[in-house]
Amino acid sequence: MADALDEADEHTVFALEHAATSLALELAHLRGVAEVELRLRRELVDDLLTATDPANAYARSEAVGHDLHRSHHVVVWSGRTGPRTTHSPRPWAGRPPPPACVRC
């Protein structure tokens, strides 16, 4: 912590350093919470795709704030691994797009 104008007394500097430390701890905590939420969401997707343990999927969905008892839409996207065969931004130009949404 730097006091460019040399106006802060030692108590003020101590209070600011304590506040900076407290803020750093809170930010680290929030980062950890975000990482856990992301992991839970990924595990929920895995549970839903593999359909191995429905009870676990319901528990995970509640933990991340999703309600699996409602209707949902699933979008499946498959990326290409090879070079594109056309320069069109829509390779299906002139035809309807391929089915990508399935109602569950």
Image (cartoon, rainbow, N blue to C red):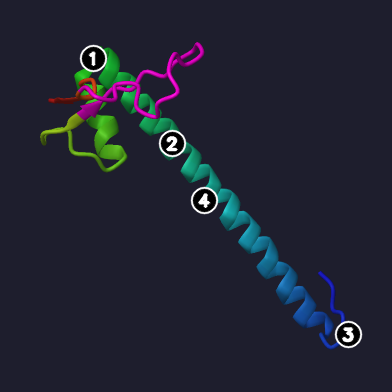
**Stretch in magenta:** 74-95
Mark 3 is on which residue type? Asp
Residue at numbered disc 2: 38
Outermost residue to the front: 94
- Front-most of 89 and 8? 89
Q: Residue at x 34, y 20 (%)?
A: 46
Mark 4 is on which residue type? Leu
- How far apart are the alpha carbons under marks 2 and 4? 12 Å
Mark 2 is on which residue type? Leu
Residue at numbered disc 3: 6
Q: Quadrant of residue 93?
A: top left
- Front-most of 92 and 50? 92
Q: Residue at x 22, y 27 (%)?
A: 74
Dot 3: element? loop
Q: Earlier in the sequence, mark 2 or mark 4?
A: 4
Residue 45 falls inside the magenta stretch:
no
Tell me the crowding category of disc 4: few under 14, some 14 to 19, or many 20 or more residues within 10 angstroms, Cα based.
Answer: few
Q: Is residue 58 left or right of residue 17?
A: left
Mark 1 is on which residue type? Ala
* For the residues bearing labels 4 and 3, Cβ distance under 8 angstroms: no
- How far apart are the alpha carbons under marks 1 and 4? 31 Å
- Front-most of 13 and 34? 34
Residue at numbered disc 1: 51
Q: Is residue 69 left or right of residue 16?
A: left
Q: Earlier in the sequence, mark 3 or mark 2?
A: 3
Which of label 2 and label 4 is nearer to you?
2
Q: What secondary structure prevails in the magenta region?
A: loop
